[in-house]
Image (cartoon, grey):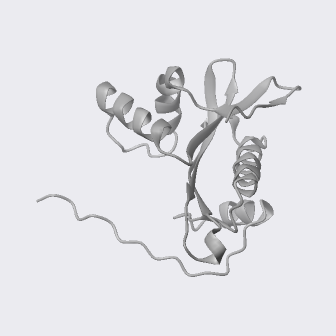
Amino acid sequence: MAHAATDRAADIVIRPAAAFDLPTLLALYRHFNHDDPDMDPRLAEDRFAAISAHPGMTIFAAFEGDLAISSVTLVVVPNLTRRGASYALIENVVTHAGYRQRGHARALIETAVATAWKKDCYKVMLLTGSKDPATLRFYANCGFSQDKTGFQIRRPAAA
């Protein structure tokens, strides 16, 4: 789905990321998890190809020229409850440190949510590990309510 929006004032383009965007996406993700080791380029290409081929999965990114400055991942999940209405997950909300507080992440979240509604999802979920009140307020201001309890389990580190 070629979904593009432009912020005319700053010439920011929002669109699904393509394979040729992978280097700038990987650079952007360094602003998200600083301690993550660099990914092997071939593994990154394989992972991006798998994401691109996965039905209902899209990485939306905001670009200034060729530079990815913000991104979100949307996953639409088919469902057997709610009369078969799918649900969606938003993950990996990240903005380049030099471009924060300018509305880019909000625009991407709005794009992802609008896409979920177009795909007849009955809800969109987002989890954050942040306890920062500003981050929580940001998600609330994007329309999310903090009315469920989230749980997760992480794979133990290899010994």
Observer-nearest residue: 112 or 64? 112
What residue lies at 69% left-to-right and 41% top-to-bottom? 100
Location of residue 55 with respect to 63 vertically, above or below:
below
What residue lies at 30% left-to-right and 26% top-to-bottom? 42
Left or right of 81: which side holds 42? left
Report whether residue 30 is seen: no
Image-quadrant location for residue 119: bottom right
Left or right of 145: which side holds 90? left
What residue lies at 61% left-to-right and 60% top-to-bottom? 88
Q: Which image quarter is the N terminus in?
A: top right
Query: Residue 108: where, in percent of width, then height?
Result: 71, 44
Observer-nearest residue: 45 or 102? 45
Query: Residue 147: where, in percent of width, then height?
Result: 67, 81
Q: How many labels does the image show?
A: 0
Location of residue 6 with respect to 71 vertically, above or below:
above
Left or right of 15: which side holds 142? right
Location of residue 59 with respect to 109 vertically, above or below:
above
What residue lies at 73% left-to-right and 59% top-to-bottom? 138
Query: Residue 105: where, in percent of width, then height?
Result: 70, 45
Q: Which image quarter is the C terminus in?
A: bottom left
| Residue at the far left in the pictured view | 159
